[in-house]
Amino acid sequence: MCKRILSAMVSTKEKTHAMEFSSGIHILYGQEGEEVLLTLAGGCCTACFLYSYMLRPYAAFGTLAVVWGTGSGDGLEQTVSAFLWLRRSGLWSGAILLEDGGLDEEGRQLAEQLAERFHLTMI
């Protein structure tokens, strides 16, 4: 009986479609059903975007990051790159200060190169 109804509805060239799930449940929907599904999908995407936007950290102004360099400056470039990434992404908008905490000649040269390349302050 259901198969005859489905075949009759599909063959009438109306804007009605039929879906059959593996459990044998038949769903008939028309153009309005498609519009409802698209509206629900768009609403869900908008809700997810707004929720993630609300959970994003607030960019604090007037903060200062002091990067302490010692020895040959191991990890100094990675730390500065991490702060610059935060600044580019809009999650942080402070100044970066490079501090010499016992850098040797190689580390001091690296810190000066970083300060010149990224316009940082070095003390």
Image (spheres, grey):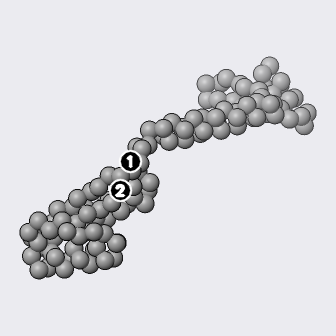
Position in image of residue 5 (x %, y %): 83, 24
Query: The residue tagged with tag 1: helix, strand or loop?
Result: strand
Q: Residue furthest top?
A: 1
Circle 1 crowding by C-alpha within 10 Å: few under 14, some 14–19, many from 20: few
Q: Residue at x 26, y 78 (%)?
A: 113
Instruction: Place residue 98 in its image quadrant.
Output: bottom left
- Above or below, 75 relative to 47: below
Query: The residue tagged with tag 2: helix, strand or loop?
Result: strand
- Quadrant containing the C terminus is bottom left
Q: Which residue is mark 2?
A: 94
The residue nearer to you, when weighing 110 against 3, is 110
Q: Residue at x 81, y 28 (%)?
A: 6
Horizontally, residue 45 falls left or right of residue 85, namely right
- Above or below, 120 relative to 85: below
Amino acid carrying label 1: it is Ala
Position in image of residue 2 (x %, y %): 78, 22
Q: Answer yes or no: do the residues labelled 2 and 1 have beta carbons within 8 Å?
A: yes
Horizontally, residue 61 falls left or right of residue 70, namely right
Q: Which residue is mark 1?
A: 60
Q: Residue at x 76, y 34 (%)?
A: 35
Q: Residue at x 64, y 35 (%)?
A: 43
Position in image of residue 60 (x %, y %): 38, 48
